[in-house]
Amino acid sequence: MNVDIGNALDTSPGVSRDGLERLDRRVERAHGRIQEGRERGEHGFAALNLPERCDPREVEDTVAPFGDPRAVVTVGIGGSALGAATFSAALESDVDAYFLDNVDPAHARRLLSSLPLEETVVNVVSKSGTTAETLANFLVVRDAMQRASVDWTDRTFVTTGPSGNLRELAAKHDLPALDVPEGVPGRFAALSPVGLACAAIQGHDVEAILEGGSAAADRLDRAGAGSLFETPAYAYGAVTYALAQRGAGVNAVMPYAESLETFAEWFAQLWAESLGKDGLGQTPARALGATDQHSQLQLYRAGPRDKLVTLLRPTERPDLEIPETDLEGLSYLGGSTLGELLDAEFEATEASLAAAGRPSVRIEIDRVDERSLGELLYAMEAACVLHGDLASVDTFVQPAVEWGKRAARGLLGGGEFPEAEAVRDKETLIVDGN
Ligand SMILES: O=P(O)(O)OC[C@H]1O[C@H](O)[C@H](O)[C@@H](O)[C@@H]1O
């Protein structure tokens, strides 16, 4: 994996080479704190030790008794779904993977009525074991299985923390259970059973995912790693921080591969929940190349100068030839490939942003496979931790999200929520369309 920050230099907003060299002294100090946090296994930093801590065999052995299912449904939300969803969207499998994260009744109904429940594995994931959406969805899935006379206890396993409703459920029904490792916030848990169990059921090589993560972790351990000019993760973390400081409040992540579209969703949670505090942060926007060249690029090139575009692509991919045609004006396409066209689009976007003085960063992975994904996710996590340290925010907490969780539970009568009355009595200004 490599990160090219050249197109972020001398743009607006932008950074200069001298500015980055000055920033590099702070990167070195932040690196010292990161390494210390990893060594002590401190909350959050512990996530950067997952590639060496997580045992792929434990994950594989837990899912092995389910045999060869036709489908797997992951019931979880946020960090308990997006890592698994990223692997699943990126890698091909004969086992279909579905995600019940949202509590949209129409979606749940449609999914449950189409699934072969007797050949489906249910993977319930919640670090806290108490998240309302996840538990509600689980109860709905369990009910559907019972109605279809499927023994849900034979088809279900959980991944959860040491306590909470889910842990109790697993104990009560003797369900197989994997642990969410201690000190690892949900959005940093992709390289743990949280992200890997679904991948294992789909037959992906979880060991290779962890090896990719280890390769990125090793880069932090090398001599001289505490420089943004040496370590790709730090190049990305430092340049996104410097640009955010100069007004790039938006980071549009644009993978040039359909299979990496979900990665941008995973990244959005990582970036938004970790860095959005104390009036700071960088709003992650999701885009897809080349599709969004034909919708969002206009804004990115000519709208407010408050954006950075992160362009991501695999350098190697299976290709498809474009057939020759006698249609006038299209001869330039014939004989080349869809991959070549996509690469040309990628480079055209980068050039188009540069010509307008807009910053972009290029991230390249070798190919879309287990190892590269492990490396990419780890590097983005390390980048985020560095960015958070430079910005002096508490990267590993999410009090604003928790307020909302408490509010939703309180409004349903499921817990203390003193502000409930104020929420119900809030002023409205309805413009009635009838
Ligand atoms: O894994 P759970 O405890 O169910 O939490 C699921 C999600 O809940 C909240 O929204 C948190 O802010 C997320 O970081 C977390 O990933």
Image: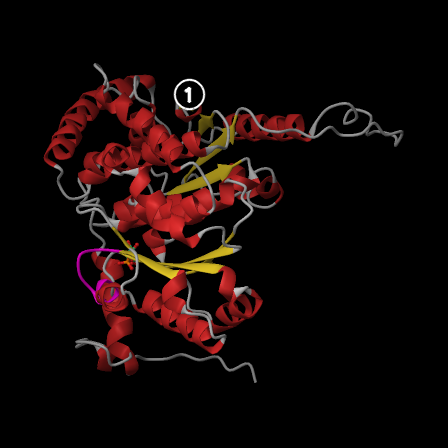
Residue 260 seen in the figure? yes
Quarter of the image with the C terminus in it: bottom right
Residue 161 part of the magenta segment: yes
Vertical relation: 24 (above or below) 75:
above
- Quarter of the view holding residue 373: top left
x, y percentage for residue 341? 66, 29
x, y percentage for residue 363? 44, 28
Q: Decide which of 318, 384 is in the foreground and name it.
A: 318
Q: Is residue 254 left or right of residue 424?
A: right
Quarter of the image with the N terminus in it: top left
**Applied colour scheme:** secondary structure
Q: Amino acid at mark 1?
A: Gly
Write the residue at 27% across / 23% down.
218
Vertical relation: 80 (above or below) 129:
above
Residue 268 seen in the figure? no
Residue 286 part of the magenta segment: no
Write the residue at 46% across / 31% down.
358
Vertical relation: 274 (above or below) 49:
below
Q: Decide which of 262, 272 is in the foreground and name it.
A: 262
Q: Residue furthest top?
A: 223
Q: Is residue 394 left or right of residue 120?
A: left
x, y percentage for residue 243? 34, 33
What is the magenta range?
160-167
Q: Splitting the image into four quadrants, where does ligand 1 fall?
A: bottom left
The secondary element bearing badge 1 is classed as: helix
Q: Is residue 14 left or right of residue 312?
A: left
Vertical relation: 398 (above or below) 329:
below
- Mark 1 sits on what residue? 6
x, y percentage for residue 379? 33, 31
Q: Tag 1: Cα neighbours inside 10 Å, few (<14), some, or many (≥20)?
A: some
Q: Is residue 177 left or right of residue 201?
A: left
